[in-house]
């Protein structure tokens, strides 16, 4: 646009408008993240006969993040992942077992690739069931028996 009222000599006038462009990359790294939450396992009352119970562990992992969930032997003296023990009055011990299947045949331990439960994250909570059993024919002191099992999520 040329402003009115200008006094200029006759001729051709050219103005060149220049511009420059550039581009840039946009990147992000998505780190695999996971979290877990566990509910207590309560067997109720034990009377020397086989008793079963179950609980759940909630695993939330980034979509497609592979994970393994292992369960420790517990804190009681002499416990292993195949024979866990609850401690009661006068340090009495009561054996119990934890399984990853409802048929109570697959022991749930803590060695990745051997006896843990593997999965792949979906971005939302996934519920895993822990199946517990107290074998029959254990005659121990009356009272309350407890143990603490540590659930470890490897991803």
Image (spheres, rainbow, N blue to C red):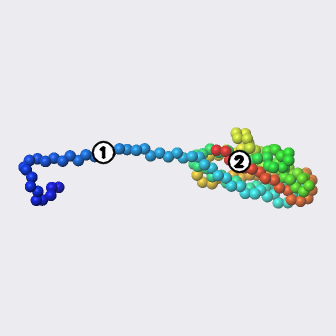
Q: Nearer the viewer, residue 92 or 131?
A: 92
Q: Is residue 145 above or below residue 112?
A: below
Q: Callout 1: few (<14), some (14-19), or many (20+) C-alpha neighbours within 10 Å?
A: few
Q: In the rendered image, which quarter is residue 111 located in?
A: top right
At horizontal 7% and vertical 49% (from top left) the residue drawn is 10
Residue 72: where, in percent of width, then height? 76, 47
Image position, residue 143 (x, y; %) = 89, 59
Mark 1, residue position: 20
Residue 62 in the image: state x and y as whole percent.
58, 49
In this view, 2 is above or below 67: below
Q: Quadrant of the C terminus?
A: top right
The residue beneath circle 2 is 152
- Rendered residue at 73%/39% (across/down): 114
| Between 44 and 144, the one nearer to me in the picture | 144
Classify mark 2: helix, strand or loop: strand
Give the SS element for disc 1: loop
């Amino acid at each position: 646009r040329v402003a009115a009222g200008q006094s200029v000599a006759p001729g051709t006038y050219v103005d060149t408008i220049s511009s420059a462009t550039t581009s840039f990359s946009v990147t992000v790294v998505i780190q695999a993240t996971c979290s877990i939450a566990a509910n207590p396992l309560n067997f109720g009352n034990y009377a020397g006969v086989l008793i079963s119970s179950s609980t759940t562990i909630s695993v939330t992992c980034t979509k497609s993040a592979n994970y393994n969930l292992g369960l420790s032997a517990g804190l009681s003296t002499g416990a292993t992942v195949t024979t866990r023990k609850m401690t009661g009055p006068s340090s009495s011990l009561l054996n119990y077992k934890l399984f990853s299947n409802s048929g109570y045949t697959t022991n749930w331990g803590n060695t990745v690739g051997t006896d843990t439960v593997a999965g792949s994250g979906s971005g939302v909570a996934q519920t895993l069931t822990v199946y517990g059993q107290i074998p029959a024919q254990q005659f121990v002191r009356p009272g309350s028996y407890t143990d603490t099992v540590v659930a470890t999520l490897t991803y």
